[in-house]
Image: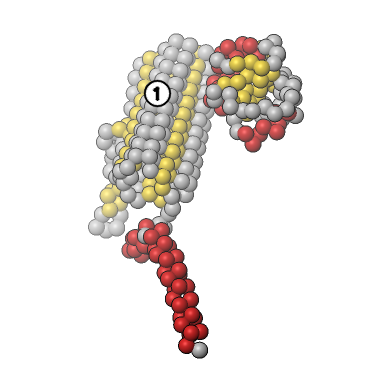
């Protein structure tokens, strides 16, 4: 299926510069695009490709100043990146839908499960007792959905996703392959003989609407109550979220990060890759945590940016942190001291010359 520049511009509310009848049937990066492709420029460092690309239609920002003649039809929008994302979703709907519905065999679907309209359940999947699956849900082959799980409308589980008993997924949730939702939290009580007694994990996981979770991520069930992933959260691959954690609305977390138990993360936070966060702390809304940071205490002030890892002896690290916080002031004092010393040397030299 092909789309014209006019159809695309209408869909994303853009302004056309060039041929409104230019047709595209695929999407591509601007440096690799061929005739009949749709591409975009959101970063000015790629502007050079605008004048050499073979793409037929390109989405650009309103603010981009075109300094040379271009062959493709341009569509100007406020935010090219976001507009292109909307179009990619549209292309995905049109070109990537399998069109499959119903339950493939061999699969097991409990007689007590409730299945909505236009649902697809792939082969070798297991749907437990009292499961509720909403309309247009897609469960790809090899998934496990435990007893009493709820999956709301338009959600999608890729192959080999495991949803343990009692967990709840909102609408339009996407979970990629290998992810486990609702595994036991890491709870063990040390005993006098040096062994550990397992603490039963009887809570669940609640994932709200419009959440996307990458592959091989683990979200543990709560010891009691719920581990909660709020609406709009985006989780990368290979993330560990422990029992009773709460992740606030529209927070994003990059790969290989680990969140320890009972920590509460606010709204609209951005957490870089390989970040480690201790348990039982609060992280304020809008917090930014740079990659490979280690967070050991509550962040109370919203919109704070933090970085660094105090990964050495605890008492020494506390002393070092206290000194480090004063480094800007110490640096300024050192500069002033150097100026004072220079002035004293000049005075002494001047005095010695007079005496001679």
Q: Is residue 137 left or right of residue 148?
A: right
Q: Nearer the viewer, residue 66 or 232?
A: 66
Residue under the image location 41 percent in, 20 percent down: 171
Please tell me whether residue 60 is drawn above or below residue 328 in the rendered image: above
Q: Is residue 217 left or right of residue 70?
A: left
Q: Nearer the viewer, residue 263 or 7?
A: 7
Direction left: furthest residue = 192
Direction bottom: furthest residue = 356
Q: Nearer the viewer, residue 10 or 142?
A: 10
Q: Residues within 10 Å of mark 1 (few under 14, many from 20)?
A: many
Residue that label 1 marks: 209
Q: Secondary structure at mark 1?
A: loop
Q: Nearer the viewer, residue 228 or 192?
A: 228
> What colouring style does the render use?
secondary structure
Is residue 238 visible from the viewing direction of this image? no
Residue under the image location 32 percent in, 42 percent down: 301
- Locate residue 122, reporting x and y percent: 52, 21
Image quadrant holding the N terminus, namely: top right
- Locate residue 141, reporting x and y percent: 53, 24
- Locate residue 316, reporting x and y percent: 36, 65
Residue under the image location 30 percent in, 43 percent down: 300
């Amino acid at each position: 299926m092909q789309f014209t520049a006019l159809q695309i511009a209408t869909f994303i509310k853009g302004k056309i510069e060039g041929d409104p009848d230019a047709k595209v049937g695929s999407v591509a990066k601007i440096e690799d695009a061929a005739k009949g492709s749709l591409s975009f420029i959101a970063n000015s460092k790629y502007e050079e490709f605008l004048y050499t690309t073979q793409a037929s239609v390109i989405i650009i920002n309103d603010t981009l100043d075109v300094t040379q003649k271009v062959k493709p039809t341009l569509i100007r929008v406020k935010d090219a990146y976001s507009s292109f994302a909307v179009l990619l979703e549209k292309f995905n709907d049109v070109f990537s839908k399998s069109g499959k519905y119903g339950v493939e065999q061999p699969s097991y679907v409990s007689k007590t499960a409730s299945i909505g309209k236009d649902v697809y359940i792939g082969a070798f999947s297991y749907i437990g007792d009292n499961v509720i699956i909403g309309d247009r849900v897609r469960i790809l082959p090899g998934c496990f959905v435990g007893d009493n799980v709820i999956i709301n409308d338009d959600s999608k589980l890729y192959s080999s996703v495991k949803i343990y008993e009692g967990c709840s997924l909102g609408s339009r949730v996407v979970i990629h392959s290998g992810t486990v939702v609702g595994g036991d939290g890491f709870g063990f009580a040390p005993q006098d003989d040096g062994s550990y007694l397992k603490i039963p994990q009887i809570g669940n996981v609640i994932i709200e609407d419009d959440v996307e979770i990458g592959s091989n991520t683990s979200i543990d069930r709560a010891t009691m109550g719920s581990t909660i992933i709020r609406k709009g959260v985006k989780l990368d691959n290979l993330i560990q979220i422990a029992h009773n954690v709460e992740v606030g609305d529209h927070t994003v977390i990059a790969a290989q990060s680990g969140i320890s138990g009972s920590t509460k993360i606010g709204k609209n936070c951005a957490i870089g890759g390989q970040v480690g966060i201790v348990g039982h702390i609060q992280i304020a809304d809008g917090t930014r945590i740079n990659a490979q940071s280690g967070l050991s205490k509550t962040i109370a002030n919203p919109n704070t940016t933090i970085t660094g890892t105090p990964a050495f002896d605890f008492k020494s690290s506390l002393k070092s942190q206290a000194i480090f916080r004063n480094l800007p002031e110490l640096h300024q004092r050192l500069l002033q001291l150097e100026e004072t010393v220079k002035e004293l040397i000049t005075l002494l030299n001047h005095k010695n010359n007079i005496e001679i």
